[in-house]
């Protein structure tokens, strides 16, 4: 599929075939989905500059230890540590743009950076402050655009699709709100998907706004190095370079069959899609749990035969508690598993994947019972656990059914 083919009417859908797998690609153009990626500028260093405004305009790196804490002077000024003479194994968490101009970046050893920028100011990290400013900028954005996916301390995706304002105006409003709440600047990319927005928020840093549509992929995205794609790390970059692929455009021009033969079916097809700017992932506003489990360590070790009644009661009650948790959180589960720890602390697990999702105590107890049959029970047991994974949100009907289930014979 070439990018020209995506010049269809907004909302048009088309199927792409990649080696037997079929992908449905909706042409969002600039409207139907409008996703922003917002990333704070030189985040940790910028928070430090709020505290020490006298350092503005200077090269500053964050990553020192407590001994590098600024010292108050008798005249009220502060004495700051410098990189010069640093000895130790610390690394830079981040640096101001003035320090980056001297060649020192996140991840670089402080001793090495001391050679490049001996006069740069060195500050210790202050994580409580960064967490507080993280919370503040996120709630400032949420007041304008509540569909937010949290991507860590200094970045978020925002789904702006339902907001009426045009993207430039929205981006400016969001940046103003972040600045008003924190005194900090950020950079924003707005495009039809997360993949492109993540690339764009980095294109005009610091304090930038970049807005692209699918029609800009060839001119704006293809010239960039392949490593700009989130998910193409140093190892993949190196392998791509070995095949003569340096830019995203070169990746897009590589036949998908070749990519699959070199990188495997899943990665090859993914590389092909992302090089064309295709990404249908939704903005996930709440993180979904991966599994729900309950376990119980017994007051005394129990034996499957001698203590059968007691063990059964505990087992059933664990299943009921898992069912209750599922119901409360609104999930159904396709994989039920058990964990068992013997008196010698050796542990075993078994699970079973069901054809349909379940959530009632009866169903969970039945599936967990199947798992238990597959475990040797000669030894005494000190712990039993039940786990529900493969979770998907329950539809209202599933929940109602759960509520009606009667519990539960052994
Ligand atoms: P980034 O957003 O990658 O970088 P940044 O905000 O410092 O600079 P930019 O303007 O380019 O976005 O990371 C956010 C924070 O995470 C950064 O301020 C410090 C921390 N961090 C580390 O501790 N170690 C690292 O290797 C990186 C990359 C970041
Ligand atoms: Mg940042
Ligand atoms: Mg970041």
Image: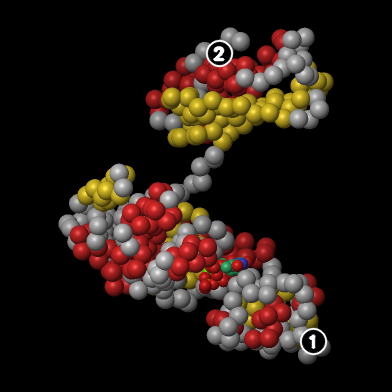
**Res 222 quadrant in image:** bottom left
Q: Nearer the viewer, residue 267 or 77?
A: 267
Q: Earlier in the sequence, mark 2 or mark 1?
A: 1
Above/below status of 330 relative to 186: above
Residue 393 picture location, percent across and down: 45, 35
Residue sitting at 61 percent across and 27 percent down?
A: 350
Q: Which class describes the residues within 10 Å of circle 1: few (<14), some (14-19), or many (20+)?
A: few
Q: Secondary structure at mark 2?
A: loop
Q: Secondary structure at mark 1?
A: loop
- The residue most toward the left is 9
Residue sitting at 61 percent across and 85 percent down?
A: 59
Q: Which class describes the residues within 10 Å of circle 2: few (<14), some (14-19), or many (20+)?
A: few
Residue sitting at 20 percent across and 59 percent down?
A: 5
**Res 189 quadrant in image:** bottom left
Quarter holding the N terminus is: bottom left
Q: Nearer the viewer, residue 72 or 391?
A: 391
Residue 276 picture location, percent across and down: 31, 61
Residue 43 picture location, percent across and down: 57, 70
Q: Which mark is residue 73?
A: 1
Quarter holding the C terminus is: top right
Say which residue label 2 marks: 407
Residue 163 visible in the picture? no
For the residue with label 2, is its CB less than 8 Å from the closest atom of ligand 3? no
Q: Nearer the viewer, residue 269 or 100?
A: 269
Frontmost of labels 2 and 1 is 2
Above/below status of 272 relative to 389: below
The image shows a total of numbered marks equal to 2
Above/below status of 117 relative to 185: below
Q: Nearer the viewer, residue 317 or 168?
A: 317
């Amino acid at each position: 599929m070439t990018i020209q083919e995506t010049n269809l009417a907004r909302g048009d859908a088309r199927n792409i075939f990649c080696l037997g797998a079929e992908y449905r690609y909706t042409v969002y153009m600039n409207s139907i989905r409008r996703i922003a990626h917002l990333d704070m500028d030189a985040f940790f260093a910028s928070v430090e500059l709020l505290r020490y405004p006298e350092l503005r305009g200077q090269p500053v790196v964050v990553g020192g230890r407590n001994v590098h804490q600024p010292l108050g002077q008798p005249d009220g000024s502060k004495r700051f540590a410098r990189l010069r003479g640093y000895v130790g194994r610390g690394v830079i968490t981040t640096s101001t743009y003035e320090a980056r101009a001297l060649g020192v970046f996140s991840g670089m050893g402080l001793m090495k950076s001391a050679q490049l920028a001996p006069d740069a100011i060195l500050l210790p990290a202050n994580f409580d402050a960064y967490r507080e400013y993280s919370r503040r900028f996120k709630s400032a954005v949420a007041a304008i655009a509540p569909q937010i996916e949290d991507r860590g301390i200094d970045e978020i995706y925002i789904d702006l699709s339902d907001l009426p304002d045009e993207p430039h105006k929205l981006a400016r409003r969001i940046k103003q709100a972040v600045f008003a709440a924190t005194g900090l600047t950020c950079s924003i990319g707005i495009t039809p998907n997360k993949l492109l927005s993540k690339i764009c928020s980095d294109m005009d840093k610091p304090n930038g706004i970049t807005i692209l549509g699918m029609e800009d992929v060839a001119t704006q995205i293809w010239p960039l190095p392949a490593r700009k794609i989130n998910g193409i790390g140093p190892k993949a970059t190196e392998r791509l370079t070995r095949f003569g692929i340096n830019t995203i455009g070169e990746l897009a021009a590589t036949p998908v069959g070749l990519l699959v033969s070199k990188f495997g079916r899943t990665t090859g097809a993914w590389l092909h899609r992302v090089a064309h700017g295709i990404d249908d992932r939704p903005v996930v506003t709440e993180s979904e749990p991966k599994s729900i489990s309950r376990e119980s360590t017994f007051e005394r070790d129990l034996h499957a035969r001698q203590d059968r009644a007691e063990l059964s009661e505990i087992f059933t009650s664990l299943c009921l508690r898992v069912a209750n948790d599922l119901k409360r959180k609104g999930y159904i589960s396709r994989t039920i598993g058990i964990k068992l720890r013997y008196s010698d602390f050796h542990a075993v697990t078994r699970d079973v994947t069901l054809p349909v999702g379940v959530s009632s105590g009866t169903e969970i107890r039945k599936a967990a019972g199947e798992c238990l049959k597959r475990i040797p029970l000669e030894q005494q047991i000190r712990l039993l656990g039940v786990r529900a994974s493969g979770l998907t949100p329950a539809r209202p009907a599933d929940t109602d059914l759960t509520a009606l289930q009667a519990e539960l014979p052994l």
